[in-house]
Image (cartoon, rainbow, N blue to C red):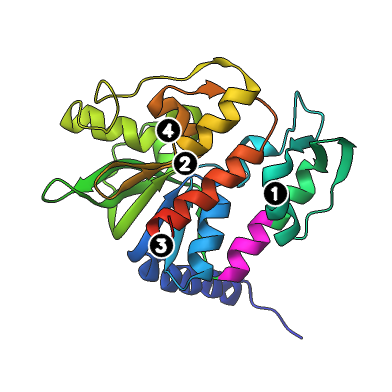
Amino acid sequence: MHLEDVTISKAIISRYQEELLEALESDVAVVGGGPAGLVAAYYLARANKKVVLFERKLSVGGGMWGGGMMFNQIVVQDEALPILKEFGISYTTFQEGYYTASSVEAVAALTLGAVRAGAKIYNLISVEDVMVRDNRVTGLVINWTSVDVARLHVDPLSVQCTYVIDCTGHDARVASMVVKKLGPVLKTKSGSLEGEKPMWAERGEMATVANTGEIYPGLFVAGMAANAVCGGHRMGPIFGGMLLSGRRAARLILGEE
């Protein structure tokens, strides 16, 4: 078979353009492709919601890839074990209540699960602002991550959605944008980001799930972003809370909780 280089380029550009046009309007836009974001995208897409996920880096997976200090194993607890099983992630019992899994397999399985459920993932795209109408988040303002990194003056594009889930980890980037533009309007004690507390795995895991929810009309937080916004503890390389938080965010949007 004779291959034309330009035809290959046309195929990539035209297909990506088609998919990006589809992403301009969605039911849920997930910002951040870490474990919480991937799990939320999976459950929402499985429920026939139109889901787009924007990841600013080259690869999804967030901090899960590195396990703990680059030992690429993760730990989950009893409550999160059903999610590992649902995604077909193999695990080993370390001792009662502690289960280990390959961080590489976990990220690969979560990503494949979300995509096969119907979620569309767009990497190398950063969110630089939010759209707010009638005191509700109604969309996002996006640009190429390379534009952000190079600090180029290039105007962004906008996407519309019914809900946004901030899964951007410690930075809680979307929630921070809302506070920067609108002031202390979040559903927290101060109305602003409370900031995360020091490492405490037990409390951090519980708080990650408990703090998952709607912090401003149309804007949900999940994963470490939930603790950063609401003042929960950091939990380190145990990822059960992240998985459970993503599932809870989806259930709240679907009206199942």
Q: Please report the bounds of the magenta region as a residue range.
A: 110-117
Residue 172 appears anywhere in the view: yes
| Residue type at numbered disc 4 | Ala
Between 41 and 2, the one nearer to me in the picture: 41
User: In the image, is residue 227 part of the stretch drawn in magenta?
Assistant: no
Of circles 3 and 1, the one toward us is 3
Looking at the rendered structure, the secondary structure element under dot 2 is loop
User: Does residue 119 sit above or below 108 in this rendering?
Assistant: below
- Image x and y of residue 95, in percent: 88, 33
Residue carrying label 1: 107
Q: Residues within 10 Å of mark 1 (few under 14, many from 20)?
A: many
Q: Crowding near pointer 4: few (<14 within 10 Å), some, many (20+)?
A: few
Q: Are marks 2 and 4 in contact (CB under 8 Å)?
A: no
Q: Residue, x 78% and y 54% (percent of image)? A: 89
Q: Nearer the N terminus, badge 2 or badge 3?
A: 2
Name the element at disc 1.
Answer: helix
CB-based contact (under 8 Å), mark 4 and mark 3: no
Q: Is residue 172 left or right of residue 34?
A: left
Q: Which mark is in front, 2 or 3?
A: 3
Closest to the camera, between mark 2 and mark 4, is: 2
132 left or right of 149 in image: left
Residue position marked by numbered label 4 in the rendering:
150
**Three-letter amino acid code of the residue under disc 1:** Val
Instruction: Look at mark 2 in the image and give the residue it sits on.
Output: 222
Dot 3 amino acid type: Leu
- Examine the rendered structure and indicate whether residue 35 appears above or below residue 109: above
What is the C-alpha distance between the residues marked 1 and 4? Answer: 28 Å
Q: Quick one: label 1 or label 4, which is nearer the N terminus?
A: 1
At which x and y percent is residue 205? 59, 31
First reached walking from the N terminus: tag 4 or tag 3: 4
Q: Earlier in the sequence, mark 2 or mark 4?
A: 4
Q: Secondary structure at mark 4?
A: helix
